[in-house]
Image: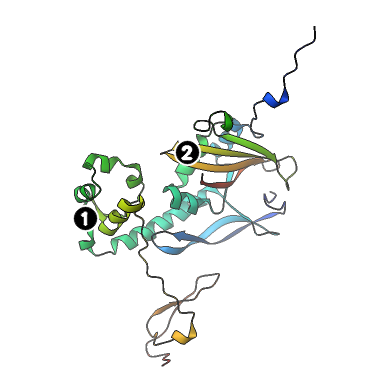
């Protein structure tokens, strides 16, 4: 098959897919098959891989939402009244069904993240970022990172755990 | 009596790739998607793979300029790099769940597969 960008030749490869999640930040879905042009690196995705990517993203996002303190969640009734909606209108709202308000399921009941409901009220999209972005690229800010996971900004994700008491820059 | 010739300016544009053929190939799984589309569809619309496919199967080939709210086919262009390939552009307003989508696609003449090389919010 010819590349739709430059007319070059596609080769089939398998690597990690970078996904910028609104909720979980940068995610890398593992082992995704795609076609990559050998000349211009343009890429195409087979439809089966689309599902694999989203299964991974959904898992990571749900995991992160469920890690939020239980006190930060409210019931559907409370969320509906915050948005000045009836409970029926709330449960039928297409955006809410699509996950535009973050929720978790406890005992078969949905509970909504209060911060997300507030954001939805303001902008119509309650998908808020639940990760704190940490960057350690500035050498002047080096400190004691023993026992912490350090994420370097590189093309491929690398995670390194520094053993206790190993590096101390003061 | 001379036959009245139709003015070519009045000819209604149609897709270069018959839409029924495009939909048939997509239904069979003979298609490739733009690499960025999963992220765009998820972040912009909350749509997964099934929703993207459903949206593509809802496209119509009626000329957009005649009724922008209901008609989806916008224009066609010859592919600059792939001989014999024609790119079709669609602007579909409120096609699914009140969301509007811009997409362009073509059938790869050698592989006989649909390539959807853009799928984003209109």
- Chain bearing tag 1 is A
> Is there CB contact under 8 Å for labels 1 and 2?
no
Residue B66 visible here: yes
Residue that protrudes farthest toward the bottom in the picture? A170
Taking the image as shown, residue A14 lies to the left or right of residue A52, namely right
Q: CA gap, disc 1 to disc 2? A: 33 Å
- Location of mark 2 (residue): B54
Query: Callout 2: 10 Å neighbours few (<14), some, many (20+)?
Result: some
Name the residue beneath numbered marker 1. Answer: A74
Residue at position x 52%, y 37% in the image: B92
Between B105 and A35, the one lying in front of the other is B105
Q: Nearer the viewer, residue A32 or A116?
A: A116
SS type, badge 1: strand
Residue B66 or residue B121, whichever sits in front = B66
Left or right: where B74 falls relative to A6: left
Q: Residue furthest top?
A: B1
- x, y percentage for residue A165? 38, 90
- Above or below residue B73? Residue A52 is below
In this picture, residue A33 sits left or right of residue A132: right
Chain letter of mark 2 equals: B
Q: Are marks 1 and 2 on the same chain?
A: no
Residue plotted at (23% across, 39% down): A88
Q: Check the picture and name the quadrant holding the C terminus of chain A.
A: bottom left
């Amino acid at each position: 098959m010819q590349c739709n960008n430059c007319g070059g030749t596609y080769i089939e490869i398998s690597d990690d897919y970078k996904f910028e999640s609104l909720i979980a930040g940068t995610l890398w879905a593992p082992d995704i098959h795609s076609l990559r042009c050998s000349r211009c690196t343009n890429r195409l995705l087979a439809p089966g891989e689309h599902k694999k990517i989203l299964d991974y993203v959904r898992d990571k996002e749900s995991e992160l939402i469920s890690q939020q303190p239980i006190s930060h969640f409210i019931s559907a009734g409370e969320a509906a009244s915050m948005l000045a909606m009836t409970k029926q209108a709330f449960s039928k709202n297409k955006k809410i069904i699509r996950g535009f308000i973050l929720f978790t399921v406890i005992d078969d009941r949905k509970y909504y993240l209060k911060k997300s409901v507030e954001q939805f009220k303001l902008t119509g999209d309650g998908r808020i970022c639940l990760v704190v972005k940490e960057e350690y690229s500035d050498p002047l800010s080096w400190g004691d990172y023993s026992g912490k996971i350090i994420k370097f900004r590189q093309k491929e994700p690398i995670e390194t755990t520094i053993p206790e008491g190993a590096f101390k820059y003061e | 009596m001379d036959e009245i010739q139709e003015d070519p300016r009045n000819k209604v544009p149609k897709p270069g790739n018959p839409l029924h053929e495009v939909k048939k190939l997509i239904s069979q799984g003979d298609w490739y998607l733009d690499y960025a589309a999963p992220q765009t569809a998820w972040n912009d619309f909350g749509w997964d793979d099934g929703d993207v496919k459903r949206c593509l199967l809802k496209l119509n080939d009626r000329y957009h300029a005649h009724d922008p709210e209901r008609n989806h086919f916008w224009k066609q262009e010859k592919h600059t790099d792939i001989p014999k390939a024609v790119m079709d552009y669609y602007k579909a307003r409120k096609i699914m769940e009140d969301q509007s989508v811009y997409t362009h696609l073509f059938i790869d003449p050698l592989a006989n597969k649909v390539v959807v090389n853009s799928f984003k919010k209109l």
